[in-house]
Amino acid sequence: MSRERIGLYPGTFDPIHKGHYDIITRAAKLVDKLVIGVAVNAGKGPFFDLDERVAMVRGEVARLDGRNIAVESFSTLLMHKAMEIGAEMIIRGLRAVSDFEYEFQMVGMNARLNPDIETVFLMASDNHQFISSRLVKEIAMLNGDIRSFVSPQVAERLLARVQQLQNEDAGRA
């Protein structure tokens, strides 16, 4: 009997966008089980807290009926999470050469921590190569239209958060 092939797709997902969703749907075809690891990543100063980000990711992947996808948060080293869930591969999305430079360093470090876990890169689809959570948040903060970058559910949450932050700023002024 062959062993279940588990892949881990880590990220901050602050917020999850259509580029992430594209990688998730494609990665799910490569493994028996895909675990989406939502990282605490407090150093990035997330817009949404961990529970909100996990809920958004779960809401998005709920549309993928019949797929063996789990969503879990983690605050450990990526390789520790991968070993905890029995993953044999880390899945990462690449948009541009600048992504590759960072990811290349991470692959080297992760291989030193556990050489048995491979990193697999999926190139962003051409219509998602420019999307990043950071840019989506900036567009939303400047009252731009984000509907082509995120699902309606994520857009609603993001716009509500922007409104909340703007109200807080107005209250301090």
Image (spheres, rainbow, N blue to C red):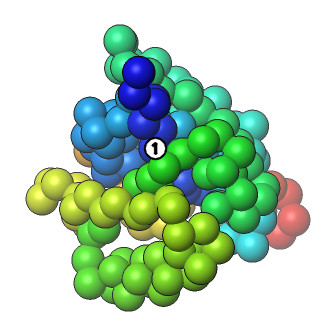
The front one of 138 and 112 is: 112
The front one of 43 and 113 is: 113
Q: Residue at x 52, y 24 (%)?
A: 59
Query: Residue 27 is drawn in which quadrant?
Result: top left
Q: Is residue 5 left or right of residue 11?
A: left
- Whether residue 158 is visible, yes or no, is no
Name the residue at the right extreme.
Answer: 172
Residue 157 spot, x, y in % from top left: 57, 36
Q: Is residue 138 above or below residue 86?
A: below
Query: Residue 144 is drawn in which quadrant?
Result: bottom left
Secondary element under disc 1, as helix, strand or loop, is strand
Q: Is residue 113 above or below residue 108?
A: above
The front one of 80 and 54 is: 80
Q: Quadrant of the N terminus?
A: top left
- Whether residue 82 is visible, yes or no, is yes
Residue 92 spot, x, y in % from top left: 40, 60
Residue 7 spot, x, y in % from top left: 46, 44
Q: Residue at x 85, y 57 (%)?
A: 171
Name the residue at the top extreme.
Answer: 66
How crowded is the residue under tag 1: few (<14 C-alpha within 10 Å), some, or many (20+)?
many
Q: Quadrant of the C terminus?
A: bottom right
Q: Is residue 160 left or right of residue 133?
A: right
Q: Residue at x 64, y 30 (%)?
A: 55
Name the residue at the front extreme.
Answer: 1
The front one of 92 and 6 is: 6
The amino acid on which the numbered mark 1 sits, given as a three-letter code, is: Gly
Q: Residue at x 49, y 66 (%)?
A: 134
Residue pointed to by mark 1:
7
Residue 72 spot, x, y in % from top left: 66, 37
Q: Is residue 73 left or right of residue 125?
A: right
Name the residue at the left extreme.
Answer: 126
Q: Is residue 164 above or below residue 66?
A: below
